Image: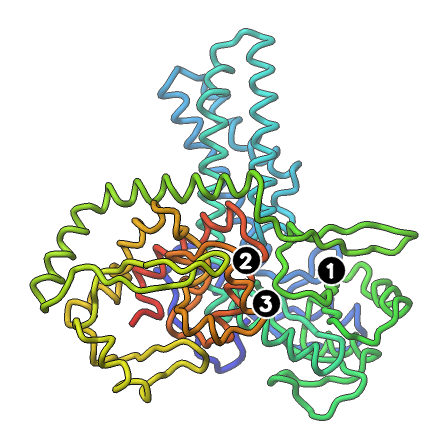
Amino acid sequence: MSEPGRTVGPVPPQTALVTKLRAVDASDLDAAAAAHRFDRPVGGAGRAPGRDGRIRPRWRRRYTRWVVVLDLLAALGAAYLANRWRQVPLAVILSVPPVAVFAFTLGRTYEHRFLGHGSEEYRRLVGSGTVLLALTATTAAAVDSGVMRTLTLVAVPVAVAGSLLAHLLARWVLHDLRRSGLCHQRAVAIGSERSIAELVRTVRRDPTGGLKVVGACVSRADSERIEGVPVLGTPADVLGAMAEQAADTVVLTAWSDVSQEDLRRLSWDLEGTGVQIMVAPRLTEVAAPRMHVRNVGGMPLLTVEEPEFTGLRRVAKACLDYSGAAAGTVVLLPVFLLIGLAVRLSSPGPVLFRQRRIGKDGRPFSMHKFRSMYADAEERLSQVLELNESDGVMFKIREDPRITPVGRVIRRYSLDELPQLLDVLLGRMSLVGPRPPLEQEVARYEEDTRRRLLVKPGITGLWQVSGRSDLTWEETVRLDLSYVENWSFGLDLSIIFRTIRAVLAREGAY
């Protein structure tokens, strides 16, 4: 949520959803519920009580309503399409949208802990749609109805697909608003100074997560602020701190000295307020699918599965690599020819640039790119070493004098990397993976950093969609290691789509 007087960044065109969420998030707070629960006045914005007295961010309720409206429209469009396929009674057409939304509601798709967070929202949407499809198909077979068969073959699948697209669109709008400082859960963190500082840095690094730390409760504090967040007292003062900051979330950080008994009493004190309690484990960069909660003697234990580098997931990744690279090479062949001609005519030298890189398990290979520098760039490297802007083992210059005019254009849109599709077809690289390092970079790797070499390097990756050349060395390593630890088929697809957006926006490219 934006602070008073703060100027927020640009957002996409003002769609109805964007406008409504902005207005709600910037509105004044009705503090009656918070004052009643915490027995003191509160300040803040955008949080109003429900009829049951529970505090709920108003943007969240409005966002849920708009997603439901989008689902209704998707189902209505699917019913109309089914009617075009085969004549369907008007009553049946009008019944499809509420039935679809009812099915999604039974599948708990609209619960705030799923809506707008992670992949569980999409899994529940598809699961609810699958159940609805099965029931429709069973009914069609039982009554031998042409109308039911039309609903089974057309209306339900199209409605589910349309709802998936609608949820993706709504998520994109929500993330963009969060990057502008809006639509966040306001959290008070409890723990040590170190763990709270790590939490604050983490949530600021990913504003799309929807969490904003607005206060800290620390047993022993050396300063009045931690990473700019005010210290509001000790863990015993958390209720007052939440009232003061109009918070709707409590985060118990790692390395906290809050006992299990204290945490249980806190949950009792917050019972019925609508305040969410989060407990941060002493783990970082571990994806949710690798973590499972197991109850032993009444104590929840977090089980962490080891990363999977083999099996069906690896086969699926290989299929995505080879099919995607083959399709991309065929579709982009005219672009290959035009860029090759432009490179050839712009400066003397070969069209393709080959460079020795280190691949999976430390095996070297020749990586191909369209030449974007003058032919003597390697010989002139010693002349520009002092201009290096990287804070780590990588070498990068924002205004490298060795880059040709054509090279600047193709680098801006990452077109110089298209020949790496051939490296994917040769089995040396993957569509998605860690950045392919140079030999001299690998020689300076620390032990942990070498885990980047457990998988094939990629044309794109988390580093590509998170800032590319604007990232520090530490951030690049963190993202690459996160990918190695948590890679999946769904993650690869997500990164590919995000790469298209990053390339078109020219984010971090030079």
What is the x, y in percent for residue 485? Answer: 59, 57
The amino acid on which the numbered mark 3 sits, given as a three-letter code, is Gly
Labels 1 & 2 near each other (Cβ < 8 A):
no
Q: 154 or 336, which is in the foreground? A: 336
Q: Which SS class for mark 1?
A: loop
Name the residue that disc number 1 marks. 274
Name the residue that disc number 2 marks. 484
Left or right placement of residue 218 versus residue 368 in this view: right
Which residue occupies 34% across, 55% down?
Answer: 500
Q: Quadrant of the C terminus?
A: bottom left
The amino acid on which the numbered mark 1 sits, given as a three-letter code, is Gly
Which of marks 3 and 1 precedes in the sequence?
Answer: 3
Residues packed near mark 1 inside 10 Å, few (<14), some (14 to 19) or many (20 plus): some
| Name of the residue lying farthest toward the left | 345
Q: 333 or 222, which is in the foreground? A: 333
Discs 1/2, front: 2
Labels 1 & 3 near each other (Cβ < 8 A):
no
Which of marks 3 and 2 precedes in the sequence?
Answer: 3
Labels 2 & 3 near each other (Cβ < 8 A):
no
Up/down of 205 relative to 110, above or below:
below
Q: Is residue 17 visible?
A: no
The amino acid on which the numbered mark 2 sits, given as a three-letter code, is Val
Q: 159 or 421, which is in the foreground? A: 421
Disc on res. 46: 3
Which residue occupies 58% across, 40% down?
Answer: 311
What is the x, y in percent for residue 280? Answer: 72, 66
